[in-house]
Image (cartoon, rainbow, N blue to C red):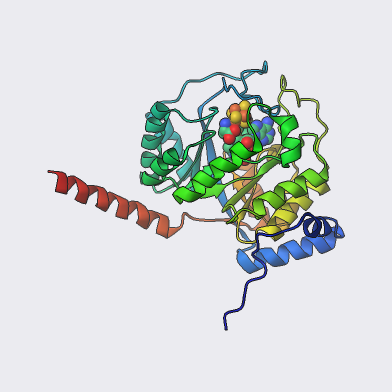
Amino acid sequence: MKMKNTDIKNNWTTKELKDIYDLPFNDLLWKAQSVHRKYHNPNEIQISTLMSIKTGGCPEDCKYCSQSIRYDTDINLEKTLPLSDIIKQAKNAKDNGASRFCMGAAWRNLTQSNLAKVKEMVKEVKALGLETCVTLGMLTGTQADELKNVGLDYYNHNLDTSEEYYKKVVTTRTYQDRLDTLQHVRDAGIKVCSGGILGLGEENIDRIELVRVLANLDMHPESVPINRLVRVEGTPYFDNNDVDEFDFIRVIALARIAMPRSFVRLSAGRDTMNDHMQAMCFLAGANSIFYGEELLTTKNSTIEHDQKLLKNLKIKTMPVDDSEILEVEQKKLEDISIAVKNI
Ligand code: SAM
Ligand code: DTB
Ligand code: SF4
């Protein structure tokens, strides 16, 4: 008889998760590390590199974001970058050891002409043998299908916090809008990257609720970025208090336990965390980072610093899955055979 895997579930209650979150710190970390070792190599992390392909001027009012047009922040507005710039950066990311290249645009939603540009970007980056991820705001089902057809691997779209607290953070869209886009992405067969930010002034219960909603999706997101607010001057959250470090680590551990197979990414804000805190996040089950000097508009840890940290911890970086490269080769062959048929 086949045994049911009781670790992987999507009917978590708030109480179950709160009880785990409130465990003594050592018990929580032990539990998280035990789950982690069952599903992942504890000494290996996945690394992604991020690039902003269109910066600033976003009509949304996310109170944490440097790119909202509503706040007076000191960023350089940029139109959609040319394909050649993107290929150059993607090659560079690959040379530095990244296995995934994530392209972010400050859009509320995707227009058809932008979709055409992004499709070219995805094809070219994938052809370099990198996994592709994009984050472009809201998507329709048809747009998600089109992105899948050019081979997009991941779509990032964060829920950020609990549904209740979300209304205080963003007023120009709803939590349901976010969930709808995630559903379109899942239905199209693209892998889901969805997580949140800590430091928006939310309570611990909002963080637990965020994990509950993510873990109760029909399928767990393959990738779960946990960001610590980068306080950007000019945004309403510039003066927010820093998140307690132990609370942050607890959330990482909770995400690991609730979504055992997912990659939990220690995302924005790493450059304000010391090495000991980052090491504890890895112990709690984080197994992915953004690597490279910049995030979208803010600084990341330097490559030099990260290399030293990973060396000290004897953590290896994960190569691009060979199957991804095989997929690219197969797609090329399919394209050639279609072209031949059309002659
Ligand atoms: N416009 C798209 C969207 O909102 O989905 C994509 C880009 S947006 C910058 C992607 C995510 O980055 C946000 O959902 C948020 O979780 C995170 N983020 C944005 N600004 C941040 C900040 N100042 N500190 C930490 N995380 C941030
Ligand atoms: C995610 O969760 N974090 C990344 C990525 N997805 C797109 C973005 C972090 C942005 C940090 C602030 C900035 O650089 O503007
Ligand atoms: Fe726009 Fe995304 Fe920034 Fe919100 S988080 S203001 S949607 S770029």
In the image, residue 180 sits, relative to residue 24, either above or below, namely: above
Q: Is 156 on the left or on the right of 253, as rendered?
A: left
Question: In the image, residue 15 lies at what x, y percent?
Answer: 81, 57
**Total number of numbered discs in the rendering:** 0
Q: Is 121 on the left or on the right of 187, as rendered?
A: left
Q: Is 212 on the left or on the right of 152, as rendered?
A: right
User: Between residues 295 and 165, which one lies in front from this camera angle?
Assistant: 165
In the image, residue 330 sits, relative to residue 167, either above or below, namely: below
User: Between residues 277 and 342, which one lies in front from this camera angle?
Assistant: 342
Image quadrant occupied by the N terminus: bottom right
Question: In the image, residue 86 lies at what x, y percent?
Answer: 43, 33
Task: Give the residue at x 47% y 30%.
Answer: 110
Image quadrant occupied by the C terminus: top left
Image-quadrant location for residue 306: top right
Question: In the image, residue 228 lies at what x, y percent?
Answer: 72, 39
Task: Give the residue at x 44% y 25%.
Answer: 81
The single residue placed furthest to the bottom in the displayed view is: 1
Q: In which quarter of the image is ligand 3?
A: top right
In the image, residue 314 sits, relative to residue 7, either above or below, namely: above
Question: In the image, residue 153 lies at what x, y percent?
Answer: 46, 48
